[in-house]
Amino acid sequence: MSLSSSKKEWSDSQHVLNYLNAADTIPHRSEGESVLLANIPKNAKRILDLGTGDGRLIKLIKSHLSNVEEIVALDVSPIMIKAVQDNFSNDSMVKVVEHDLEFPLPDMGYFDAVISAFAIHHLMHKRKYTLYEEVYNILYPTGVFCNLEHVSSPSVDQHNRFLNAIRRSHKKEDNTNRLLSVEKQLQWLRELGFVDVDCYWKWLELALLTGYKI
């Protein structure tokens, strides 16, 4: 069985290193993460992190939320998975699942919150939609979906402004990006049944898309 494009990309150590180095220097990232954390219910017990990377969001959750009993860290990259396992080697709260988001989510039960940071924009648009539907279906009532995401700009000029702000040239853009507008993704979330859907935070091409399940 051949590897998916995601598996190939995220099995490349240089690609992973480049991503982590770039992600750590994104301006205003901590602002978006703070708003994400503020929207997770304080009584949340089970949380799913889609495309967990090295577990950055998990560390933040553990330092901000005291009632969490289990965090499922899902990623396709063997390199990222090893990093998460190393970072939480003695932490029974963190469960690591290797899975490619290009394919339907495995059966993991239900969650009080599903979160993601800068992962879903790598998927084809059709798969983004079906993933959002799967997320809705595995949330408990009153559960929340928080997606801190890289979104498309409304114009070429705005995109260039974003690249200048993060000190990135067109030549160094990530060719795995498949960016989509905030408006379209919020529309999808509403269509799927999420309520209180909105962009809860935004800076240029970085946005926190959030919706709750009744």
Image (cartoon, rainbow, N blue to C red):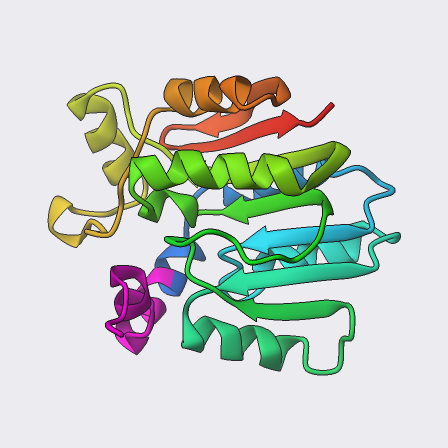
Q: Position of residue 194 (x, y in %)?
A: 61, 23
Tell me the quarter of the picture where residue 182 sits.
top left
Q: Is residue 214 left or right of residue 80?
A: right
Let me know if residue 94 is in the magenta part.
no
Q: Position of residue 156 (x, y in %)?
A: 16, 24
Q: Residue at x 42, y 50 (%)?
A: 119
Q: Residue at x 58, y 40 (%)?
A: 135
The range drawn in magenta is 1-19
Q: Assign the C terminus to one quadrant of the image.
A: top right
Q: In this view, does 174 lie to the left or right of 62?
A: left
* Predominant SS along the magenta part: helix
Q: Position of residue 42 (x, y in %)?
A: 84, 40
Is residue 79 shown to the viewer in this render? yes
Q: In this view, does 183 lie to the left or right of 29?
A: left
Q: Residue at x 41, y 33 (%)?
A: 129
Let me know if residue 14 is in the magenta part.
yes
**123 over 153 or under it: above or below:** below
Q: Which residue is drawn at 32% across and 74% down?
A: 11
**18 over 197 or under it: above or below:** below
Q: In this view, does 162 lie to the left or right of 28?
A: left
Is residue 32 shown to the viewer in this render? no
